[in-house]
Image: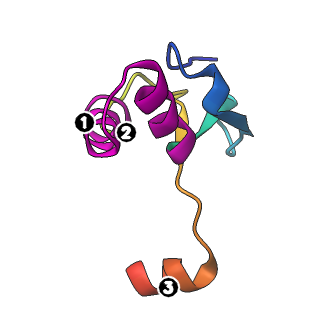
Amino acid sequence: MLKWDGFDNAIIGVGERNNTDSMIVYDYDKMVKVLVTRDDMSYEEAEEYIDFNIVGAWIGDTTPIIVTKKNIEEIEEEY
């Protein structure tokens, strides 16, 4: 499985889809926290870095999944 270097503390599990290999699943907020504490970034800088360099990256069918936790009300409101 592919993984994002330096973000092991943000791993929350393994994702699976029909007809694909399993992939590592990361918690977005935990990834932000890693950059804020490890790299001394501001929250906004960390979000921008993750959105551009990680969420927007495609490294194949087993590209890790990034999860942003939301409840059903937040999902219905946003989408």
Q: Nearer the N terminus, badge 3 or badge 1?
A: 1
Q: Which residues are magenta?
A: 29-54
Dot 3: within a 10 Å radius of its alpha carbon, few (fewer than 14), some, or many (20 or more) residues?
A: few
Residue drawn at point x = 55 percent, y = 22 percent: 7
Residue drawn at point x = 54 percent, y = 31 percent: 64
Which of the image's four quarters has the N terminus?
A: top right
User: Which of the 4 image quadrants contains residue 27?
Assistant: top right
Residue 10 position within the rendered picture, expressed as x and y whole percent measured from the top left: 62, 32
Q: Nearer the N terminus, badge 3 or badge 2?
A: 2
Question: In the rendered structure, which amino acid carries the disc numbered 3?
Answer: Glu
Q: Total label count?
A: 3
Dot 1: within a 10 Å radius of its alpha carbon, few (fewer than 14), some, or many (20 or more) residues?
A: few
- The residue pinned by badge 1 equals 52
Q: Are marks 3 and 2 in contact (CB under 8 Å)?
A: no
Q: What is the CA distance from the residue labelled 3 to the residue labelled 2?
A: 22 Å
- The residue pinned by badge 2 equals 55
Residue 55 position within the rendered picture, expressed as x and y whole percent measured from the top left: 37, 39
Q: Are marks 1 and 2 in contact (CB under 8 Å)?
A: yes
SS for tag 2?
helix
Q: Is residue 67 magenta?
A: no
Q: Is residue 57 toward the left or the right of residue 17 in the image?
A: left
**Nearer to the camera, 33 or 27:** 33
SS for tag 1?
helix
Q: What is the CA distance from the residue labelled 3 to the residue labelled 1?
A: 25 Å
User: Which of the 4 image quadrants contains residue 42?
Assistant: top left
- The residue pinned by badge 3 equals 76
Residue drawn at point x = 63 percent, y = 37 percent: 25
Q: Would you place residue 31 above or below residue 1 in this image? A: below
Return the residue found at the far right.
13
**Nearer to the camera, 37 or 55:** 37
